[in-house]
Amino acid sequence: MKRIIINKNLVTSEIQRYVGPIDLSEESFAELLKISTIEKVKKHDLFLKPGEVNDYMGVVLKGMVQIYHYQGNKMISDFFAGEGCGFFDTQSFLLGTPTESYFEALEPTVIAKFNRKKFLEEGEKDPEIDLIYRRVLQYAITMSNDRLNSILHDSAEEKYINLESRIPGLTSRISSINIASYIGVTQETLCRIKSKQESFF
Amino acid sequence: MGSVETRVFDEFVKKVFGDNFDSGLSPESKVKMMNRGQIVKMEKGEYLQIEGDVSKAWGYICKGLVRVYYMRDKEEVTEQLSAEGEGFLDCESFFKQTPSKRYVQMLEPTTLYLFNKLDNEEITSDNYEIRRFTRCLIEKALLDTKKRILNSIFKSAKERYTTLLEEKPSLVLRTPSNIVASYIGITPETLSRIKSKNN
């Protein structure tokens, strides 16, 4: 199997954008890698389904992951994770309860998985790793807060622009159905928003 | 360390985590943790922080009502609304230590237990128990934020208001309507309509 090299910057740069600089020595990073496993997922694969426990934090090394759940019959897209982006289903990950969400690969994807129990055990021994875990939580809460504010106060157009700035090549990588679900509009409305954006230039 | 502070700290842990939670803090660690905090009394209308300040502390409310808001197109957007037994945190400014866009204002005379950011990482880095405790705090805050997202996304104005009323009736009673409306992402007019339909 071709060896996959995990780039330290790839893994930490997204977090640093939101919560400030991270000091991670090569030694600690090496320890962190020891507890990770690499998994390849095919396009459209659902690698977490309701009822399962999300006991790991994922980092996308290559590809794109979508987290979604159903509210009745309605599919709600919660999060898109591209290269360098971490993801987990908060409640299942933190409490060890069965998830209500799906993890779907939107492209052929490679992820690094960090088991939470092992992460915390390493954190007990190594303050740098413990700090990384807390930084990830800080990142998660900052992002969740932004998401909440956006849901409550942004117009559909603003939501679209925010998503575009976070995910380069958005429209070529994520289908309209999924984008519309994330923003909370119909596909027709999304079409209108997109054409308005394009005619801007 | 006074007995008042100890009582407040124990109460804080109980309120945030529940009666059965073991903070995992030895007596020594607990004192260290409490030494990072201080009890502060503030008046109604007073600001703990305004736009441009760098957030230096997160707070736990012993008594009173606090809101965190920011300006958007000349309007106040209420992001957090917290009462007794709850906390507040300006995530962005606190973690990055950059100037904030947020205001932290008392809506009633309020007694806070404030934990300072100063030397946060250094103090906790050699004390595993404190590191674990602060980790639990962030995890709890993250769970609460996610819950608010689930209570809001694809929910109608009426559903959002009803849920808030069920979960935090005291909060709704004590807070001016326009602030409640902003907190759940609806207009004051819509909230008025919902309230009058309920009567």
Image (cartoon, coloured by chain):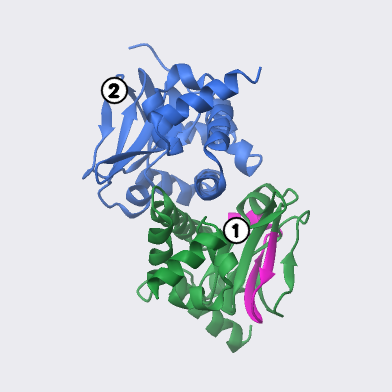
Chain colours: A blue, B green
Checking the image for residue B124, the label placed there is 1
Q: Residue A131: percent from the left, percent from the top?
A: 55, 47
Q: Residue furthest left?
A: A51
Q: Residue at x 49, y 72 (%)?
A: B26
Q: Amino acid at mark 1?
A: Thr
Q: Residue A98: percent from the left, percent from the top?
A: 25, 49
Q: Residue furthest right?
A: B52
The stretch in magenta equals B103-125
Give the SS element for disc 2: loop
Q: Residues within 10 Å of mark 2 (few under 14, many from 20)?
A: some
* Relative to A110, A26 lies left or right: right
Q: Residue B115: percent from the left, percent from the top?
A: 64, 67
The quarter of the picture where residue A17 lies is top right
Against B191, residue A17 (above or below) is above
Checking the image for residue A44, the label placed there is 2
Q: Residue at x 49, y 80 (%)?
A: B11
The quarter of the picture where residue B50 lies is bottom right
Residue A35 magenta: no
Front-lying residue, A112 or B177: B177
Checking the image for residue B46, the label placed there is none
Against A28, residue A122 (above or below) is below
Q: Chain of mark 2?
A: A
Number of marks in picture: 2
Q: Give the quadrant of the N terminus of chain A.
A: top left
Q: Residue B13: percent from the left, percent from the top?
A: 48, 73
* Relative to A72, A139 lies left or right: right
Front-lying residue, B121 or A41: A41
Against B153, residue B172 (above or below) is below
